[in-house]
Image (spheres, rainbow, N blue to C red):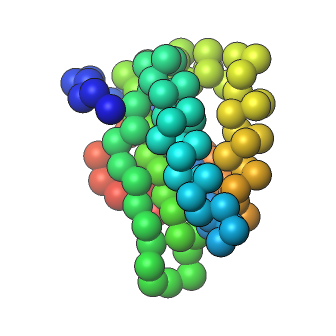
Amino acid sequence: MRSTMIRPQYAIIFRYDVRPDTQETYFRYVVGDFTPALQEHEIYMQDAWHVAWGNYPERQLEYVTERFECIQRLLQSPEWERLEGRLKSFTTDYSMHIQRYTGAFKV
C-alpha cells in the first residue's frame, strides 16, 4: 500500500473477532479489497490492532479521513452494503463507529 499524508479529522473504528475458519480469506479481503475500496473514498487505514488479552474484540481496524463528507459518501455508496456485508461474513461481535480523530488508541 502506498503512503498518503493527511491531517486526520475523523476516524472509523471497526471491532470484531475473526471467525477461526476464515482467517486467511479474511486477511486477503481486508488487504486486497476492503482497504483499497475505502481509499477510493479518501479514507485510509491508520492502525490495525490485534488485542490479545482482556474481554475485548480481538481485532480493531482504524481508518481516518480529513473530511466527514468522505465517510458520508462511502456509507451512501451502492458498494458499502457489499463491502460491509463481506467483512461481517468473516467475523463475530462486529461493531463499527465513527468519531472525531483523537490520535490515540480508541477504546
Q: Residue at x 65, y 72 (%)?
A: 20
Q: Is residue 2 left or right of residue 15?
A: left
Q: Position of residue 10 (x, y in %)?
A: 43, 32
For the view shown, which residue lies furthest in the bottom direction?
Answer: 54
Q: Quadrant of residue 81?
A: top right
Q: Residue at x 30, y 53 (%)?
A: 104
Residue sitting nearer the eye, 30 or 95: 30
Residue sitting nearer the eye, 10 or 2: 2
Q: Is residue 89 left or right of residue 56?
A: right
Q: Residue at x 76, y 52 (%)?
A: 89
Q: Residue at x 48, y 28 (%)?
A: 36
| Residue 7 visible | no
85 above or below 9? below
Q: Position of residue 5 (x, y in %)?
A: 22, 24
Q: Is residue 52 left or right of residue 75?
A: left
Q: Position of residue 43 (x, y in %)?
A: 45, 26
Q: Position of residue 14 (x, y in %)?
A: 56, 50
4 above or below 97? above
Assign the N terminus to one quadrant of the image.
top left
| Residue 86 visible | yes
Residue sitting nearer the eye, 48 or 72: 48
Q: How many marks?
A: 0
